[in-house]
Image (tube, rainbow, N blue to C red):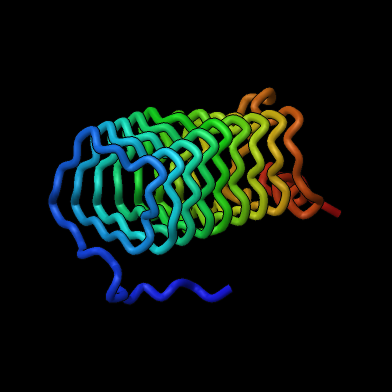
Amino acid sequence: MPAPDPTPRPEDPAPVTGETLRGDDWYGRDLTGLAYTACDFYDTDWTETTGSGARFDRCTFSGVRFNVSRLTATAFTHCEFRRCSFFDARLDQCKAVGSTFDDCSFQLLRVTGGDWSFTSFPRADLRKATLDGVRMREADLRGARLDEAVVTGTDLSGALLAGVSLTDADLRGSDLTSLDAHTLDRTALAGARIDPVQAVGIAVGMGFEVA
């Protein structure tokens, strides 16, 4: 499937810069073609928003509800998310490079593909979330809870994983070279599923000689 053409189309809304929006109701809105730079969104309702190709750069989202959103190829670059809700949100081939997520809720979140490198999820509760085929290089997941999460085919190279909990998580096909099993409590890895190639890599990283 070809990537969306980022060139603005005649029917796209004009780009918006430096605005502050408070309490706006965007329920069910189609975000296709929107472009916001250095804008602040406070307590706005984005429930069931849809669309593709929207761009948000260096924006702040505080108390925004992304519940049941269905967004494709949408970019949130170097944005800040504070106390936002992503209940049952679906983000396909989206970009969130350099963005931070603080005190957000992610119940039933599903992220498929896209680039989420250099993101920060301090102590995030990502239990049962799905991260499939996502690029998350050097993401900060320290102290995050990924119990029963599906983290498959995801690039976690260089990620910060100290204190992460992966109980019963499906990690097959993901790059786990940054995972230092020595620093994790054994219960944090209980029941986690990995493939044979990952098992060899982890064993070598722990100092075992694999014959």
Residue 150, horizontal then vertical, whole percent? 66, 41
Residue 36, horizontal then vertical, whole percent? 24, 56
The residue at 19%/48% (across/down) is 39
Q: Most extreme residue toward the left, as rendered?
A: 18
Tag count: 0
The residue at 46%/57% (across/down) is 94
Give 119 or 157, whichever is nearer the viewer: 119
The residue at 72%/31% (across/down) is 168
Residue 211, horizontal then vertical, whole percent? 86, 54
Q: Is residue 116 left or right of residue 131?
A: left
Residue 142, horizontal then vertical, whole percent? 47, 34
As drawn, 200 above or below 35: above
Q: Most extreme residue toward the right, as rendered?
A: 211
Q: Is residue 27 left or right of residue 202?
A: left
Give 154 or 38, whichever is nearer the viewer: 38
Give 52 or 208, whichever is nearer the viewer: 52
The answer to whether one can see residue 59 in this image is yes
The residue at 47%/44% (across/down) is 69
The N terminus - image quarter: bottom right
